[in-house]
Image (tube, rainbow, N blue to C red):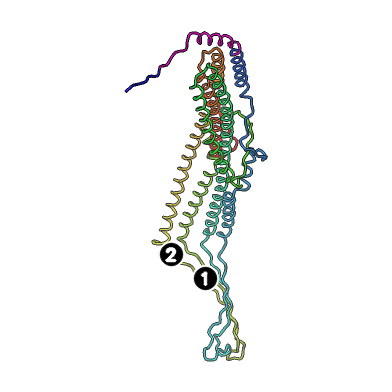
Amino acid sequence: MLYSRKIVRHPCTMADAWKTTTDQRHRPVRHAWRTTRIITLLALMTLWPAAQATPVENTTASALSLEDAVTIAVDGNPGLAEMQARAEAMAAIPSQAGALPDPMVSFNALNLPTDTFDRDQEAMTQLQIGIEQSLPFPGKLELQERAAEFDADAAASNVDETRLRLVHRVKQTWWQIYYLDRALEIVSRNQDLLRQFVQIAQTKYKVGEGLQQEVLLAQVELSQMFDRQIELRGLRRQQAARLNALLDRQTDTPVVLPEKVDEDLAGILPELQLYTRAEASRPLLEQRRQEVEAARTRRDFARRDRYPDFKLGAAYGFRQGENADGNSRPDFASFRIGMSLPLYAGRKQDKAYDQRTSEHLQKQYAFQDEVGKVQAEITAALADYQRASEQVQLFKTGIIPQARQSVASMLSGYQVNKVDFLNLVRAQITLYNYETQYWKSFSEANQAMARLTAAVGEEVINE
């Protein structure tokens, strides 16, 4: 069997000479092309931070400011309206608890003879009208009314706490959406820039001044930007639906936020001062105080409930007929007084007092526990705010300017073929990643401020 073998011949010397002559003839053209491309790239990267990004949503809806979002939520949230209606119902209870029981009016027919049912037949026969009033032991009604007032105040504080938490959730969601908008802008700029890089790499590869791997790697980075964009858009739709639910709107209502906000982060009061303000201003702590007072009042009522209650009554009886002496029979007037006898106080009133005493202790412990939780919320939110604000300052004054200088330096090196194309691409992506981290830290700082405001119970907690 014969085997054939393919022989690969190298280009001849004349071909090499022709290629060299051709390269020399086209070198000025290539140099001019490269200079033009580099100048275009330099201008693109220099002007890019000032360029406007593609809008996140194509809609004519007006921008929803943070203040407007809070106002809409407070005015129309059904959960808050439910708590408000409950508080109003609780406010109507104290006057009821402090009122006397309704008197009883009675109409009676007494001593009617069953043989004739004649009212004149017997002297004791009468038609009677009476009234009866129950009177609790002095002080019991007052204690019941005071306990109901404390419950009503606790319900009102619960409304304030619900409103505070609602505002916190609105602010947190609003700032999360704001961060996602900024991140989408940065990703959009990255995509446009990487498209330019891919075109440059392809052009250089076609003329023999670049490598195919530069084109492929740039395309990979561009594909990753598309994947990141899909992820961010999904997150934004989720947060927009959540914000619409808080505002009691249709979940698919377009949510458009302002593009610019004040980027200054305010200073915060010292931690101990925030504790003090929270004890005086946090509705949750006020609610727990009112519950403690209500439990204490009910304990006092249980102690007083060992004393008897009273019942007073009066009746007037009408008689007909005449006495034996021929005179008309006089009417009868009746009066009565009664009181309860706590014969089973050991099993009833004493046990009720023990129950109310334990409930009072439970409310006291719950209040102390809530104070500790509020202080922990303040500490955690303050730590998050300080960490995020420090990161914002670091990114704004240190990392991002340095990254921009690094990109500019690499671009200069790329002009003279001293910097690899891939390193230039990665440096630019790193810059935009730092910008994304800046907006994320800025959003987290404002979210931590919202948490801190909710934990303290005051809107103004800045220095």
Give the answer, above or below, for where 162 lies relative to 141: above
Q: How far apart are marks 1 and 2 (CA)?
A: 17 Å
- Classify the position of the C terminus by image quarter: top right
Which residues, given as a range, are shown in magenta? Answer: 7-29
Residue that sits furthest to the left in the current view: 1
Query: What residue is shown with label 1?
Result: 337
Q: Residue furthest front?
A: 1
Confirm whether residue 463 shows in the render.
no
In the rendered structure, find residue 342 and report the number of the disc placed on it.
Answer: 2
Residue 356 lies, in percent from the top left, at: 44, 54
Q: Place residue 347 in its image quadrant.
A: bottom left
Query: What is the x, y in percent for residue 409?
Result: 55, 15
State which mark lies toward you, 1 or 2: 2
Q: Is the magenta stretch mostly helix, strand or loop?
A: helix
Q: Is residue 369 visible?
A: yes
Q: Which amino acid does label 1 sit on?
A: Ile
